[in-house]
Amino acid sequence: MSDSAEVLVIGGGSTGTGIARDLAMRGLDVTLVEKGNLTHGTTGRMHGLLHSGGRYAVSDQASATECIEENRVLRDIAAHCVEMTGGLFVQRPEDDDEYFQEKLEGCRECGIPAEVLSGEEAREMEPYLAKDVKRAIRVPDGAIDPFRLCVANAASAEEHGARIETHAEVIDVLVEDGEVVGLEVKHDSGPGKREHHTPGETEKLYADYVVNASGAWAGQIGDMAGVDVAVRPSKGVMTIMNTRQVDTVVNRCRPKGDADIIVPHETAAILGTTDEEVEDPDEYPEEQWEVDMMIDTLSELVPILQEARTIRSFWGVRPLYEPPGTGTTDPTDITRDFFLLDHEDRDDLPGMTSIVGGKFTTYRMMAEKISDHVCEKFGITAECRTADEPLPGSDDFSILRDYMDEFGLRSPIGRRSVQRLGSRADEVLKTGEPNPVICECEAVTRAEFADAVEGSGSDLNAARIRTRASMGNCQGGFCAHRMANELAPKYEAEVVRTALDELYQERWKGQRHALWGDQLSQAMLNYALHATTMNRDRDPARTGASVDFSAFDGGPTEPGEAGADASAAATDGGSLREDESRQEGR
């Protein structure tokens, strides 16, 4: 594998993978490095809203116009990642009439289709809206899967010759004679497809040009290069509810504020969000009051949320940026526009450009702009094609209907598999092998999961983001061990255990903020299942203790012997306490 490229891209989120795809399609030799999985940063921690632009139609009409344009592009090139749910900007009795009118006129000025609905008409669309909702504006908002979209961009980049290196953290920017010439990365790879280096090994990668697309971490990369990139990270919480309480994106029609949007996403609904500036994008408080506020405030729009089960909460960090000297103190006032910082022009440091700010919906356009900039450096005149060429799996989405007919797929399992795989459904699902469901909540079958493992190696979290397995109501309680089992016998037992541990931890960290009521019961059920059936709470193989196989119930050896020696059974694999042994005379 080459340790040099024409362009190094830092960041495996939507913008980074979009840039890698664009540059590779124009013929450049590209390597992308990402310190975690794809979508490790901000992209994997958003509410999955495909903006119509309505959200910015009053405060930032330039961004609103970009959003509706890219909304249409993504529907074409990433059909298998998008669900066009539609959106409503809902007005409650206490919300301002003048602002409602400004929103409506703003949408129309930006070319966003907008229709006024009465409260009754809005409730016909969404029966769980509050009965006192006054009226609403209908816009073409949608839901989009950020994981699938990034993977599709990375896969397309690889198809055009790019190297995608995940779990490779940038630890230094290499500067020689006053020019950026590459990066030093530390690998944390595991077995499988991404086993390029030994974990902990460092590698120097050289390039003619470096693009810093690391989002909220762009300032840290800038520090390594000796330039100031004043990103202002702003955290926001998202809370996932157990079902789709709404099938349409529901926005509160009032000026920007906390807790004003509900996004139906796959089998759940995501509530968002807050907007609070933080010092460090890796270390910031995750506070319960933020979660409570999501539910309390958004219940004013959809009262049933008060009775629903909260599955988990997670926080993301926006990479906000504004030019030096602006002096905005409220992060909600900082523009959502993006900025291209050419460090040669700006800091007299050739060889590197940073891209900061921006929004997920406009990632492709941002990638196009910075790819134009990089191509100009190389004297390349190739045109951008990313708005016209479909992403892998999306080139002929009408195939979904054909498959439904061909395979008689009328069940949610078949429908969702084909929706996720898009035009790749044929090559993945026609295995000729038994294809049981591995994850019931998200309807993921063995064939689809095997395809994800083939693409991601032994990293179960990487396979998770490709399929959504373990992301449903049980949060891995009923499927995590099945997912791990699919790694065997290809990988050694210790590799599988490590992958399962990582998956458990990833699932657990979001549930910690939702441990009350029914979700607490679900968490305890998961714990009991894993502790009693897999001994996950005191696994001798992990602690180094010997395994007492005689403690397991071997079952009856003779007909009619069942229960004859039930006192000897210890189905959790543990040994009886000494006092219990004495009482039972053993």
Image (spheres, rainbow, N blue to C red):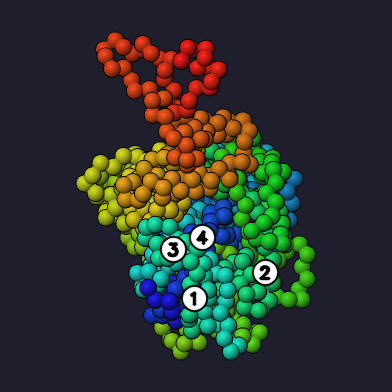
User: Where does the image place residue 248, in percent across and percent down from the top left?
Assistant: 53, 47
Callout 4: SS: loop
Q: Amino acid at mark 3?
A: Thr
Callout 3: SS: loop
Dot 4 and dot 1 residues touching (CB under 8 Å): no
Mark 2 vs 3, N-terminal side: 3
Q: Residue visible at 28% across and 17% down? A: 557
Mark 3 vs 4, N-terminal side: 4
Give the residue pinned by disc 3.
198
Whole-number angstrom distance, CA of label 2 to CA of label 3? 33 Å
Callout 2: SS: loop
Mark 4 vs 2, N-terminal side: 4
Residue 107 or 234: which is nearer the viewer? Answer: 234
Give the residue pinned by disc 4.
36
Q: Which mark is residue 466?
A: none
Number of the front mark, 1 or 2: 1
Give the residue pinned by disc 1.
204
Q: Is residue 521 above or below residue 295?
A: above
Crowd rating for badge 2 (residues with CA inside 10 Å; few <14, some 14–19, many 20+):
many
Q: Amino acid at mark 2?
A: Val
Whole-number angstrom distance, CA of label 4 to CA of label 1? 18 Å
Give the residue pinned by disc 2.
231
Whole-number angstrom distance, CA of label 1 to CA of label 3? 14 Å
